[in-house]
Image (cartoon, rainbow, N blue to C red):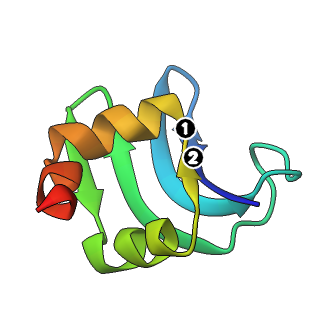
Amino acid sequence: MVKLRLKRCGRKQRAIYRIVAIDVRSRREGRDLRKVGFYDPIQNQTYLNVHAIRYFLKKGAQPTGTVHDILRKAELFKERAS
């Protein structure tokens, strides 16, 4: 099973997260299938590859709670429901 989840990058006290499609059995810093965006909580910036995210969601990938909130703020599910 594939999940969309956050992968921590950056340095101490200055975390930046990549949003990745990754196998459930992999650890947080494990090898990802594809990078689909990033999230910077300090500057509150988000970049999403919407095409790749929709592809993985159609294939059955489940977003984690935090990634789900990020996608909801970006109104990705609003477009998907239409």
Return the residue found at the far top: 13
Q: Amino acid at mark 1?
A: Thr
Which one is earlier in the sequence, the residue at label 1 or at label 2? 2
Labelled pair 1, 2 in contact (Cβ < 8 Å): yes
Provide the residue designation for mark 2.
5
Residue 51 higher or lower than 39, as above or below: below
Residue at coordinates 17% horizontally, 37% vertically from top-left?
Answer: 73
Return the residue found at the far right: 25
Residue 77 higher or lower than 66, as above or below: below
Residue 28 rendering spot, x and y as whole percentages: 75, 43
Is disc 1 placed on a helix, strand or loop? Answer: loop
Residue at coordinates 24% horizontally, 48% vertically from top-left?
Answer: 46
Is disc 2 placed on a helix, strand or loop? Answer: strand
Q: Quadrant of residue 21?
A: bottom right
> Left of 8 or right of it: where is 48?
left
Provide the residue designation for mark 1.
64
Q: Quadrant of residue 1?
A: bottom right
Residue at coordinates 70% horizontally, 66% vertically from top-left?
Answer: 32
Residue 50 rendering spot, x and y as whole percentages: 27, 70
